[in-house]
Image (tube, rainbow, N blue to C red):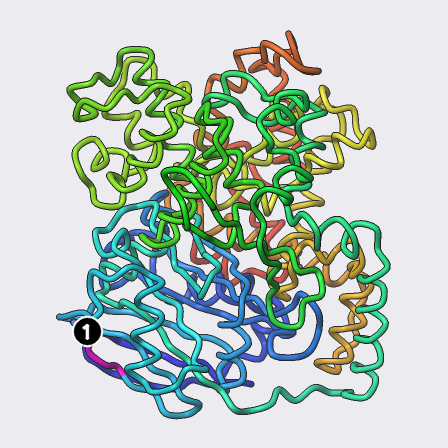
Amino acid sequence: MGKLLRIDLSKGKISRDELNSGWSKEYIGARGLGARYLFEEQTGDVIPLSAENAFIIMTGPFTGTAIPAGQRIEVITKSALTNTYLCSSVGGDFGRELKLAGWDGIIIKGKAETPVFLWINDERVEIRSARQFWGKYSDETQIVVKEEVGDKKAKVACIGPAGERLVKLASLQCETRSAGRGGPGAILGYKNLKAVAVRGTKEVEVKYPDELNSYIKDLYEAIRTNPILGRDRPKYGTMEFTTTVGVTGVLPYRNFQSVFLESDIDKIGYDPESWRAQWVVKDTACHFCPIMCGKISEVKKGPYKNIAVEGPDYETAVMFGPNCGNTQMDATIAANYWCDKFGLDTMSTGSTIGFAMECYERGIITKADTGGIDLTFGNSEAMVKFVEKIANREGLGDLLAEGTKNAARKLGRGSEGFAMQSKGLEFSAYDPRGAWGMALGYATNVRGGAHNQVFTVFSELSGKYERFSIEKRAGLVREVQNMRAVYDSLQMCIFSSAVISIDSCTKLCSLVTGENVDATTLLLRGDKIYTLERGLNVRDGISRKDDYPPARILEEPLPNGPAEGKIIGHANYEKMLNEFYQIRGWDQNGRPKRRKLAELGMKDIADRIEF
């Protein structure tokens, strides 16, 4: 659309900018373009919870077209949780609506004196009072904001009470989807921005519309006939992973002390067939997506009767399930439900509660700390209660609201070694001791311990790579990081990559933008994006010391499953890390070398990073 919207909440000022066409070509869009703007908007010494911290919402070049699985947005800011670069991708309909309103992205700075929300109605943009919405749950907020603007078709992204209370695990809720990782909700809570509502009536112009429509039909058919995207994913969503991950022994159990195996999963009904039969009542999808990975689950009896939520997906089910020693799916659904209402990242919240449970069983946390609650593994009622305590910063929940790394720093007594995080961001639901590339991936990921940008695990589990080896692992991690940077910048859901390959993306790029680009060029841009993001990390003080997994991952073997008895070890990890730095073109402290930056055409970046 060629336009960016700028909001200065401190001054109540709204302005429009032309999109930097050079940057949009170099950095593709969404994640890459947002990172480039973030680099320009602020310096490395900006405090996340400050008026100076920019909050950027960016669409991709495919957003607003009919391309399947391409309707996402990227949120880019400096993380409240990790104190460094954050990118968080989210699906749903919000991104499409923003593009149809005529905007490629929004850059929000400053801090409003009182709670406000942003109303974007095509070209008409207003900052309105949100005092009447402050304190409301996220789902309630979406309803009342639509009533306030008088348009039920508007799409709303908002924070819940957790964001208002500056909980560092707080998410941005986009209808039923979440930009959860890294605490973006806390950034908006500090800025007193409760919600962004948008309504668009324009069309997105593409270079070759007829050819694009024809190719889109081919892609829809390819997805429909694909055995994964056309059969398993629409039926089970990401819960289909439970069996695969359980068979291979990388599904975390009790705060990554062990792993849950397939036989355990079948016993508790976490297998995809039992889960769908007992809990799923409806399938959902993002706009123009035939994959339909979203599932509405409903509890029909027991203490959580009538609770329904879109989810849980695999990550949520594991982090609130086996990772907390919980075998009750109704409690997992309830935890997911309350996370969405309060506006909390389910992965980090489940991980943090699992960490607290281990601390409790080791005597580092006591009943006096928990308010009399028996916070043992498997106590599903306590698990659900602590979602609320974290959201409200109540008692021990106030400490846990800071995330596992910060909590471990305060608790001490060896808890740092089993705080399952990297750079302050909690691990997702794959134990890297069962797929060694994930250890390097989690630790070197620019946003911390998230799986999406470093998802080597299925390549390792498939037998393509020897999973308990460091051979070729640095190259695999680099390859996946660059590829994921491309998909996130195009804003293509990564699930689509089973059909929509990098080569398909190049064709889509040419049909949408008119630029003829090959796969090599796209992946080089992915390298450039990842290198820029590492530059942002370096500017924030990140270095080699931050590129290690917790001690448990390097020093403790898994007690059961295929990885039993195998230890990654510090020496092996150092070899992987050194090789990774070498092929990335980074020095031994993890900083991109000037020569590497020059090769990527980033001399202007090099001149503004301290080496």
Q: Residue at x 67, y 65 (%)?
A: 69
Q: Position of residue 82 (x, y in %)?
A: 37, 43
Answer left or right for 318 relative to 292. left
Residue extent of the magenta highlight: 127-131
Q: Position of residue 129 (x, y in %)?
A: 19, 78
Q: Which residue is mark 1?
A: 10
Q: Residue at x 56, y 45 (%)?
A: 279
Q: Residue at x 40, y 27 (%)?
A: 354
Answer left or right for 426 relative to 580. left
Q: Residue at x 28, y 13 (%)?
A: 413
Q: Residue furthest top?
A: 565
Viewer-nearest residue: 606 or 569: 569
Q: Residue furthest front?
A: 301
Answer left or right for 587 relative to 192. right
Amino acid at circle 1: Ser
Disc 1 secondary structure class: loop
Position of 395 relative to 12 (above/below): above
Position of 197 relative to 210 (above/below): above
